[in-house]
């Protein structure tokens, strides 16, 4: 069957749902393709529920399998929920948490739009929920405040800023990477673009909690007294990265890897728990591009 063009009304619906931006939360590029989540070759039809707005780069990554079908479905559902404006959102019926969205918009001399998702645990179900929710909201809102500080320049310099200056934008999404027993591990992904910046920024924050009673978890809690655990972590992570260094046809430079994985606490501060063990996240430019 020869592939037909996506009807204009259907295409418009998908673009409006995504705010005429890429549906991947950290990517707000406005040059947009419309992608079939289940490939056209398989479904042989156009359906709004099977279409998602992606920038050309994310579109290529989806075709290569770097962004898998399950992730695309989650992004699609997230976009639909935000578009419908539901204030208390749930990602899946089986999740013991809901998703809430903080939204803040300003449209005077200094324009910005902030939209941040974060998990919310029901205090009626968990005795520790109120305190955990306070930790979660604080993690997200402290990053929102940082973007406000950039967007809301002091009033005395507003006159020097051109009215044509674009809108600063901020976005946040999250993953609950582990929730079981007394352990809760969340990874937050942030995106920010300042109107006068040359490119957007992406970064990560983590929140690891023991619950009931609540206290935050640090790496040192899992190693013996006197153990040189940072050296062990450094050696292990460097070994993992070796195959990705350019000398072996990879995409990393060995000098960047060595510098970014030095045995320092700050280098390994972003860690989460998952079903398969510890997961370390390195921000852009810390071990490579």
Image (cartoon, rainbow, N blue to C red):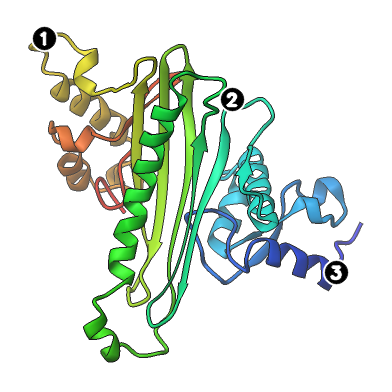
The one nearer the camera, 249 or 104, is: 104
Instruction: Assign a secondary structure to mark 3.
Output: loop
**Residue at (65% x, 38% y) in the render:** 70
Instruction: Assign a secondary structure to mark 2.
Output: loop
Compare marks 2 and 1 and give the one earlier in the sequence.
Answer: 2
Rendered location of residue 271, percent (x, y) = 31, 30
Rendered location of residue 206, percent (x, y) = 34, 36
Label 1: which residue? 225
- In the rendered image, the quadrant that contains the C terminus is bottom left
Residue 164 visible in image = yes
Rendered location of residue 6, percent (x, y) = 82, 66
Label 3 to label 1: alpha-carbon separation: 65 Å
The one nearer the camera, 159 or 69, is: 159
**Residues at marks 3 and 2 touching, judged by CB atoms closer than 8 Å:** no
**Residue at (57% x, 45% y) in the render:** 67
Q: Residue furthest left?
A: 226
Label 2: which residue? 96
Q: What label does residue 7 carry, if any?
A: 3
For residue 199, side relative to residue 107 (left or right): left
- In the rendered image, the quadrant that contains the N terminus is bottom right
Residue 6 visible in image = no
Rendered location of residue 173, percent (x, y) = 48, 46
**Residue at (69% x, 61% y) in the render:** 17
Compare marks 3 and 1 and give the one earlier in the sequence.
Answer: 3
> How many other residues sit within 10 Å of disc 1, few (<14), some (14-19) or many (≥20)?
few
- Vertically, is 144 above or below 21? above
> How many other residues sit within 10 Å of disc 3, few (<14), some (14-19) or many (≥20)?
few
């Amino acid at each position: 069957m020869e592939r037909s063009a996506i009807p204009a009304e259907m295409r418009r619906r998908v673009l409006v749902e995504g705010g005429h931006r890429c549906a991947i939360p950290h990517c707000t590029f406005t040059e947009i393709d419309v992608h079939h989540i289940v490939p056209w070759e398989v479904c042989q039809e156009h359906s709004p529920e099977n279409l998602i707005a992606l920038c050309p780069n994310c579109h290529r990554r989806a075709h290569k399998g770097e962004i898998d079908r399950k992730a695309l479905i989650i992004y699609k559902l997230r976009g639909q929920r935000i578009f419908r404006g539901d204030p208390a959102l749930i990602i899946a019926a089986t999740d013991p948490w809901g998703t809430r969205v903080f939204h803040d918009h300003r449209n005077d001399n200094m324009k910005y739009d902030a939209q941040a998702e974060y998990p919310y645990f029901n205090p009626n179900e968990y005795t520790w929920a109120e305190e955990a929710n306070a930790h979660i909201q604080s993690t997200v809102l402290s990053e929102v405040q940082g973007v406000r500080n950039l967007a809301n320049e002091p009033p005395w310099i507003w006159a020097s800023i051109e009215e044509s200056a674009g809108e600063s934008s901020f976005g946040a999404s999250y993953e609950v990477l582990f929730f079981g027993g007394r352990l809760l591990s969340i990874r937050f992904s942030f995106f920010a673009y300042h109107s006068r910046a040359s490119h957007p920024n992406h970064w990560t924050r983590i929140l690891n909690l023991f619950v009931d009673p609540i206290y935050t978890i640090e790496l040192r809690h899992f190693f013996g007294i006197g153990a040189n655990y940072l050296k062990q972590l450094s050696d292990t992570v460097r070994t993992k990265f070796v195959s990705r260094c350019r000398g072996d046809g990879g995409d990393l430079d060995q000098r960047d890897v060595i510098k970014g994985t030095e045995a320092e606490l700050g280098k390994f501060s972003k860690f989460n728990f998952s079903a398969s063990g510890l997961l370390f996240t390195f921000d852009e430019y810390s071990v490579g591009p």
